[in-house]
Image (spheres, helix red, strand yellow):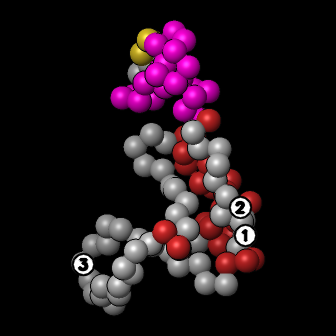
């Protein structure tokens, strides 16, 4: 990964900005993702790991209440799937084995 140096837009200190086009130092970049609270520590840890370790693609927790106008689009088919929403029915007992599924 190419590192560039400059002023962090979060703390205004001159630091290594290792996150590509995001002008944040490591500390400020990580701090913006500390509030993940799905209610399940395995899910929270998975989300935080993707946020810390991947700039282009990362998971984000979105509460079901935040979805608007939820509609069933299609069922089955052979075309490529580009967006997946994994439904966690009865999700009180999700463990790391389920997450790796």
Q: What residue is disc 1 on?
A: 95
At 51% across and 55% down in the image, what residue appears? 59
Mark 3 residue crowding within 10 angstroms, few (<14) / some (14–19) / many (20+): few
Give the quadrant of the C terminus. Answer: bottom right
Asked whether the viewer can see residue 29, the reply is: yes
Q: Secondary structure at mark 2?
A: helix
Residue holding disc 2: 42
Bin the neighbour count of mark 1 within 10 Å (Cα to Cα): few under 14, some 14-19, many 20 and up: few
From this view, report whether residue 93 is shown above or below residue 27. below
In this view, the residue farthest toward the left is 79
Residue 96: name its quadrant: bottom right
Q: In the image, 46: left or right of 14?
A: right
- Alpha-carbon neighbours of circle 2 within 10 Å: few (<14), some, or many (≥20)? some
CB under 8 Å between discs 3 and 2:
no
Residue pictured at 59% horizontal, 54% vertical: 47
Which comes sooner in the sequence, label 3 or label 2? Answer: 2
Q: Position of residue 10 (x, y in %)?
A: 52, 24
Identify which residue, 59 or 11, lies in the foreground. Answer: 11
Looking at the rendered structure, the secondary structure element under dot 3 is loop
Which segment did they paint magenta? Answer: 7-30
Of the pair 16 and 66, the residue shown nearer to us: 66
Eyeballing the image, is 51 above or below 26? below
16 left or right of 49?
Answer: left
Where residue 1 appears, x then y in whole percent? 44, 26
Q: Is residue 16 magenta?
A: yes
Coordinates of residue 80 in the picture (x, y in percent): 27, 73
Q: Look at mark 3 in the image and give the residue it sits on.
A: 79
């Amino acid at each position: 990964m190419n590192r560039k140096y400059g002023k962090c837009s979060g703390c205004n200190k001159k630091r290594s900005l290792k996150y590509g086009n995001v002008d944040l130092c490591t500390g400020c970049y990580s701090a913006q993702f500390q509030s993940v609270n799905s209610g399940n520590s395995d899910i929270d840890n998975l989300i935080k790991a993707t946020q810390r370790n991947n700039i282009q693609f990362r998971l984000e927790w979105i509460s079901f209440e935040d979805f608007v106008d939820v509609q069933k689009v299609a069922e089955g088919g052979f075309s490529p799937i580009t967006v997946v929403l994994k439904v966690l029915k009865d999700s009180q007992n999700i463990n790391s084995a389920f997450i790796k599924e």
